[in-house]
Image (tube, helix red, strand yellow):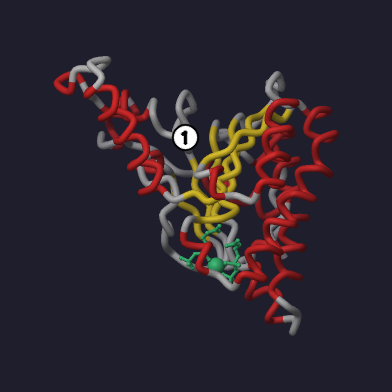
Amino acid sequence: MRSSVTEQDISQIPTHVAIIMDGNGRWAEQRNRPRLFGHKAGVDSVRAVVEAAREIGVRYLTLYAFSTENWQRPMQEVSGLMGLLKVYLQAELKTMLQNGVRLSCLGQQERLPDDVRQTLAMVMEQTACCRGMTLNLALSYGGRNEMMRAVRALARKCVAGELDWRRLDEEMLAAHLDTAGQPDPDLLIRTGGEHRLSNFLLWQASYSELYFTETMWPDFRKKEFLEALATYGRRQRRFGRTGAQLQG
Ligand code: IPE
Ligand code: IPE
Ligand code: MG
């Protein structure tokens, strides 16, 4: 049997890891339980992965928790997810402060229920001074929606005469995304066996290393996270250059 990966096996630590946490519903269905049971188990994976990432020295962790498309799910599931989110935030605040985890939010916060928004605002404010790791929760997030909001903000500044459209560049667009000021993800993980981006970080993931696993999110814990990091460590990132150029 192959022994599991340890922290020593990881040759390079990605600065930013982004995760599409997929497979909660199927995990529950396989156990003849309601989908929300899978989401609850998924929260324990969130805790485990946040802790592992923090321990190992990942500086930014972005978790896709709810997409703009997920609003189309049955109302009961949506409200169950919102409830879990609120409970998670309330329960984790103390640990986040102890571990220096700063909470940040990507997506259309204004679409979230008031109580969830208030809890998010409270946790973001309290953890604003934390410097250990930034935890981005993507909530009511869609990459296209994020880009449209950025484009609108830029257009408004051009019309107001604050910006000259001839000077618009990639850096300026990036500075108007929800991830402004943060590095792009080095590694993007998707659990649950699907091979798609589902509208996640469409701009920021342009050069991310992709890692897909069949493991359902509730089964994805520290061991599986370390395996993904070890795989990442064996990749050669060429950014358009040749392998020989990188050796030189
Ligand atoms: C991911 O798990 C969690 C959210 C989208 C909120 P799913 O709920 O999509 O689980 P599957 O894909 O149906 O198994
Ligand atoms: C992507 O998962 C969104 C999140 C993990 C929050 P989905 O399960 O919603 O994605 P699709 O619909 O299968 O592409
Ligand atoms: Mg899914």
Query: Residue at 33% of width from left, 36% of height from top?
Result: 238
Relative to residue 86, is residue 193 drawn left or right? left
Q: Where residue 30 sits in the image (x, y, percent)? A: 69, 81
The x and y percentages for residue 100 are 75, 26
Image quadrant in which you'd find residue 129:
top right
Please name the residue that numbered disc 1 is placed on. Answer: 178
Q: As displayed, is residue 179 above or below residue 220?
A: above
Per the image, label 1 sits on a secondary structure element best described as loop
**On the rendered image, what quadrant is the N terminus found in?**
bottom right
Q: Position of residue 248 (x, y in %)?
A: 31, 24
Q: Residues within 10 Å of mark 1 (few under 14, many from 20)?
A: many
Residue 235 falls in image quadrant: top left
Any atom of ligand 2 within 8 Å of the CB at mark 1? no
Q: Is residue 10 above or below residue 85?
A: above
Question: Residue at 29% of width from left, 22% of height from top?
Answer: 157
Query: What's under tag 1, amino acid-wise?
Result: Asp
Residue placed most toward the observer, 229 or 206: 206
Position above or below: 109 against 30: above
The residue shown at (69%, 49%) is 5
Residue 38 versus residue 57 in the image, above or below: below
Image side of residue 240 versus residue 4, left or right:
left
Where's residue 85, x and y in %? Answer: 71, 51
How many marks do you count on the picture?
Answer: 1
- Name the image quarter holding residue 173: top left
Ligand 3 rendered quadrant: bottom right
For residue 153, side relative to residue 95 (left or right): left
Q: Nearer the viewer, residue 128 or 18?
A: 128
